Image: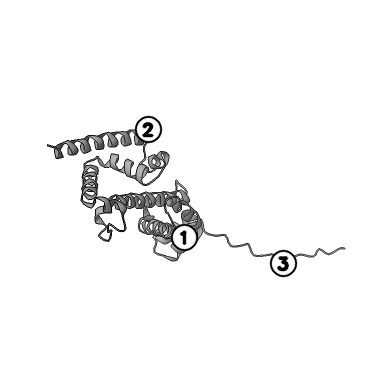
Amino acid sequence: MRKTIRRPTQPAPETEPSDAQLVATYVAGDHTAFTTIVTRHERHMKWAARKYGRNEDDVHDILQDALLKASRNMHLYRAEAALSTWLHKLVLNSGFDWARHRSRRELAILDDTHTTPAEDPRLAVDPLSYLDVALTIRQAMDQLHTDQRNALLLVDLGGYCIDDVAHYEGVKPGTIKSRRARAKAQLRTLLQADFFAGTE
């Protein structure tokens, strides 16, 4: 009678916890679970952040802001959507927030106390006139409706496409187009009114 050789049974490989399990573990107080989440999704999040940052320092800032939001709001995550989608949304929000602040910084040239006529040829030609125009533009921008101003800042100064801005704002691309159009029309009206007021 032939004997059957039995191979020793191998232990079943350990399965990695799911994203939902990691979230539940982190919310319960185990902060090491968040480290695992970051390790698992950081590459994808960094890729998304590169759409908004100009360099690696910008990408790092956007990513850190998104991760901070994730750590503080993980209890709000619902498993109906994939965790990667939720994290991508946080990066999107952080990226657009960063872009909005960057656009405002670029617009606020009067805050640059280190600019001299030698560094900026526009100031060398007629510094008082140039600064006066810049101040007028800033004041006009401040009078725009927030939605219109954001559309103008993100598309025209931030350089983002209308579809991305629409996705971030949660509206249709046509809405962003109309906001930009209204913002530009109002700016023209405000600036023309200021010009003619100055000639009286």
Residue kind at label 2, given as amino acid type: Gly
Residue 8: image tag: 3
Determine if residue 77 is in view.
no
Where does the C terminus fall, quadrant-wise? Answer: top left
Determine if residue 162 is in view.
yes
Picture quadrant where residue 111 is located: bottom left
Could you say where residue 21 lies in the image, as x and y percent from the top left?
47, 57
- In the shown orientation, is residue 196 left or right of residue 118? left
Where does the N terminus fall, quadrant-wise? Answer: bottom right
- Give the camera-side residue of 48 and 89: 48
- Provide the residue designation for mark 1: 38
- In the shown orientation, is residue 148 left or right of residue 199? right
> What is the residue that sits farthest to the front in this orientation?
125
Of the residues tagged 3 and 2, which is closer to the observer?
A: 2
Residue kind at label 3, given as amino acid type: Pro
Mark-to-mark CA distance, 1 and 2: 36 Å
Which of marks 2 and 1 precedes in the sequence? 1
- Provide the residue designation for mark 2: 174
Is mark 3 in CB contact (under 8 Å) with mark 1? no
Question: Is 24 situated above or below 190?
Answer: below
Which of marks 1 and 3 precedes in the sequence? 3
